[in-house]
Amino acid sequence: MQKADRHSISSTDNVLDGDGRLKTPFQSHKPLRGAPGKGKNKRLELKDLAIPKKKEPWQIQKQALKEKFGDAGWNPRKKLSPDTMEGIRTLHEQDPDRWSTAVLADHFKVSPEAVRRILKSKWRPSEKEMEKRRERWAKRHDRIWDKLAELGLRPQRTQEKALEGPDEFEESLRAKEILDNARNA
């Protein structure tokens, strides 16, 4: 008779796996007392008997994104303005066949994942929030323009002025458009 090895387990022993969950002897990788062979034959384990659950599409997508982006999460390098995002939504709503995710991504020079997230989002800002966002983006526009002007990639602004507000910018564009239309008529 062989002496029982202290690493073998009986069917009444409790063994914890790496996550601290209780394993049954059939889930353990250690052979049972009196198990034939030295692991040559693959043993049937409980997890082999379980019917695999079919994952929902959103679970598959979530897992793929977690593997792709890791702990950092989604943080695209190129940010789109709120008006541009609204334009993407509008184009897709008007003609989804012509303005597919791939076409929109190519047109706006962003990843298809960014377009997918924009189209998926149902959140819309209130009027007050929209105004704050426009002001922030107008300041961002002026800040970027000044940096590019320092590098010599854009012309300097002729006069030092306070940061342009979004309404002033839109009004000046409308005024120029009206003048051009009046001159051409």
Image (spheres, rainbow, N blue to C red):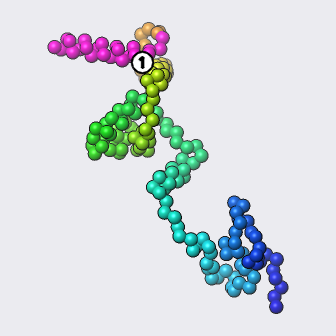
- Which residue is more in the foreground, 148 or 3? 3
Residue 44, picture quadrant: bottom right
Q: Residue at x 54, y 50 (%)?
A: 66
Q: Position of residue 55 (x, y in %)?
A: 49, 59
- Which residue is more in the foreground, 55 or 104? 55
- Which residue is more in the foreground, 179 or 132? 132
Q: Residue at x 44, y 15 (%)?
A: 164
- 180 magenta-colored: yes
- Left or right of 97? Residue 51 is right
- 5 magenta-colored: no
Name the residue furthest right: 3
Q: Residue at x 74, y 69 (%)?
A: 15
Q: Position of residue 93 (x, y in %)?
A: 31, 39
Which residue position is annotated with label 1?
166
Residue 20, picture quadrant: bottom right
Q: Secondary structure at mark 1?
A: helix
Q: Residues within 10 Å of mark 1 (few under 14, many from 20)?
A: some
- Predominant secondary structure, magenta span: helix
Q: Position of residue 2 (x, y in %)?
A: 81, 88
What span is in magenta?
162-185
